[in-house]
Amino acid sequence: MRAVCWAVRNRVVKPGNTWWGDDWEEVILKRWQFTSFEKSDPNVSKLPGDPSKDPSWQQALEAAYDVYRGVGDDITQGATHYYNPDAVLIIPTWVKTATFKCRIGKHMFYQTL
C-alpha cells in the first residue's frame, strides 16, 4: 500500500510533468492510470471503503496520509509506475522506456522520464 502511495506522490510532485494531472485528485483519477478507479475493475465496487468495518482500509488511509505528508522514505526509489506481472496478460508498453527501480511483494516499480 505504501509503495503505491509513493508512486502516486512521485507523479504529483514531478516537476514539469502535468500529463498525469496537476494535483492529487487529477493524478489518482486520470483515466487508465490506476485500474482500481476504472469502472471495469472489480475493485471499484469496494470504493470507498469503511475503515470501521475493514482494517485494511484503515491501513490504506494511514499509508496515504503519511505519504501525502512526506513522512518516511520513498521505498520505491522515485517510481512513478508499477504493475504486478502475475495480474497482467501483456507487459505494459511503458516498461520499454522506463527505468526499473525495485520489486516490492509481487509488484514491479519503475520510473519514467
Image: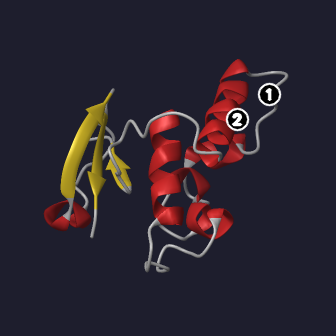
**In the visual, does 14 lie left or right of 110?**
right
Q: Nearer the viewer, mark 1 or mark 2?
A: 2
Q: How is the image coloured?
A: secondary structure
Tell me the amino acid under the disc marked 2.
Leu
Residue 87 placement (x, y as % from top left): 33, 40
Q: Secondary structure at mark 2?
A: helix
- Contact between marks 1 and 2 (CB within 8 A): the answer is yes
Q: Residue at x 56, y 70 (%)?
A: 30
Residue 59 placement (x, y as % from top left): 66, 25
Q: Which residue is mark 2?
A: 61
Q: Which residue is mark 1?
A: 51
Tell me the amino acid under the disc marked 1.
Pro
- In the depicted view, which residue is nearer to us: 87 or 93? 93
Lower sequence index among marks 1 and 2 = 1
Q: Residue extending furthest left? A: 96
Q: Judge whether 89 appears above or below 52 on screen.
A: below
